[in-house]
Image: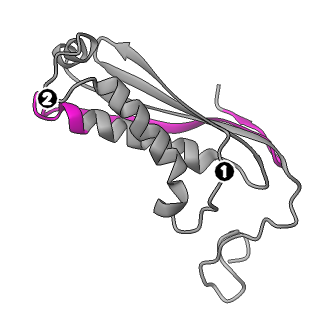
Amino acid sequence: MSDFTHIDAQGNASMVDVSDKPVSHREAIASGFISMAPETVMAIKQQSLKKGDVLAVARIAGIQGAKRCADLIPLCHPLALSKVDIQFSLETNGISVSCLCKLSGQTGVEMEALTGVNVALLTLYDMCKAIDKKMVIEKVTLVKKRGGKSDYDRK
């Protein structure tokens, strides 16, 4: 069990001690996609849904999600994020969402980026479910991680 960083010698779940790690600039990008009917994408683009500006609400929700990651994922460290950016790309059959998180700290921000993109996607789903019953959230992935011991780039 010692290969898992969140398991102690007795096999119990444990938060990793990062107090001796150096502070460094860290950044992560996660992305995901929500497939939906072309008519739903058009309604979002035209801001004609009864719930209001879908993208503005989903952007704020994604930012809040990234900031609240440690409240949702039990062993994540609470982090003072210096930047959270949610971006949308409207496509014919859905919306791509990306979440960038940055900080200077002792642990990475990939979980925050993944949480941010998921909350943004869930908010899109929630705001459009009345007009589109066949939406699917998919392809959620870590795209890039920089800082700490290793860099990761899916590209």
- In the rendered image, the quadrant that contains the C terminus is top right
Type of the residue with mark 1: Ala
Query: Residue sitting at 70 percent across and 38 percent down?
Result: 27
The residue tagged with tag 1: helix, strand or loop? loop
Answer left or right for 56 relative to 6.
left
Residue 115 visible here: no
Residue bounds of the magenta highlight: 126-153
Q: Residue 12, relative to residue 18: is it above or below?
A: below
The residue carrying pointer 2 sits among few (fewer than 14), some (14 to 19) or many (20 or more) residues within 10 Å by Cα, namely some
Label 1: which residue? 80
User: Which label number is shown at residue 132?
Assistant: 2
Determine which of the numbered discs, if any, sits on residue 1 in the image.
none
112 displayed left or right of 137: right
N-terminal of the pair, mark 2 or mark 1, is 1
Packing grade of label 1 (10 A; few <14, some 14-19, many >=20) is few
SS at badge 2: loop
Looking at the image, residue 92 sits to the left or right of residue 62; the answer is left
Total numbered circles = 2
For residue 54, say whether it is visible. yes
x, y (%) of residue 73?
50, 62
Q: Give the amino acid at mark 2.
A: Asp
